[in-house]
Image: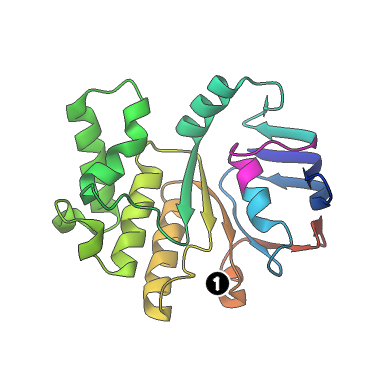
Amino acid sequence: MIQLQNIQKIYQTRDIETIALDQVNLRVEKGEFVSVMGPSGCGKSTLLNIIGLLDKPTDGFVQIDNMLINKQKDKKLASIRNEKVGFIFQRFHLINSLNVIDNVELPLLYRKLSSSERRKLAQENLERVGLSHRMKHFPSELSGGQSQRVAIARAIAGNPGILLADEPTGNLDSQMGHEIMEILHQLNKVGEMTIVMVTHDENLARQTNRIIRFFDGRQVN
């Protein structure tokens, strides 16, 4: 499903060269739920951005579903990202001027779907995360846990095979974090989604199939 070969990512300014990822080799099988751990600044988010096709490696190869990504044009990358990858962020990234269902519909605007088809998918996915009763509310009217549920519904609205979660429980209390993890496990087991989750919480990481640890841009296990 996901394969990284000899990935290196260097950020270069006029005076400073920063190696964010250094010779990373990683394979995530279809249907796996893996967690990525390491101290701040070790390259975890950079790794997610490369897997999610938001950033390109300085060197090395990326394959998604046996497709070599490196030589794809930006328009094709955007299409692959929209169809195959869903993103969940620590800070939710909902649009405050849109209500819940319109937020969930956003990634579907880039699909060849009618407005009624988009609305139906958005409703179904809000039901999956237990928020069908909040469809007309705005983000400012939601709790943190509810906001993250909306963000998950948005991420899965297009039925991606890969779900990338960057500290999805980082802004939530322990009870809300537990509920979000239950949803992720359900999506993994029933929805058969491949999930890569960045977390600082060792207890949450132990609930996943395996833990990948990073330090100073290098994979250490």
Which residue range is magenta in the image?
49-59
Question: Does residue 71 sit above or below 188 in this rendering?
Answer: above
Give 186 or 162, whichever is nearer the viewer.
162
Q: Quadrant of residue 33?
A: bottom right
Circle 1 is placed at which residue position? 204
How far across and down, in percent of the image, does residue 71 sit? 71, 21
The N terminus is located in which quarter? top right
Q: In which quarter of the image is residue 147?
A: bottom left
Considering every residue shown, the one lying at the far front of the view is 14
Residue at horizontal 49%, vertical 25%?
Answer: 79
Q: Does the magenta stretch include residue 188?
A: no
Q: Main secondary structure of the magenta part?
A: loop
How far across and down, in percent of the image, does residue 58 sit? 79, 37
Residue at horizontal 34%, vertical 41%?
Answer: 157
Q: Does the magenta stretch include residue 57?
A: yes
Question: Does residue 107 sit above or below 203 in this rendering?
Answer: above
Numbered disc 1: secondary structure: helix
Task: Left or right? Give the position of 90 relative to 39.
Answer: left
Q: Which amino acid type is shown beneath numbered disc 1?
A: Leu
Residue at horizontal 46%, vertical 53%?
Answer: 88
Give 3 or 6, whichever is nearer the viewer.
6
How far across and down, in percent of the image, does residue 76 sit? 55, 21
Q: Quadrant of residue 112?
A: top left
How far across and down, in percent of the image, does residue 21 sit? 78, 50
The C terminus is located in which quarter? bottom right
> What is the total number of numbered labels drawn onto the structure image?
1
Q: Residues within 10 Å of mark 1 (few under 14, many from 20)?
A: some
Give 159 or 54, whichever is nearer the viewer.
54
Give 120 or 206, whichever is nearer the viewer.
120
Residue at horizontal 16%, vertical 56%?
Answer: 137
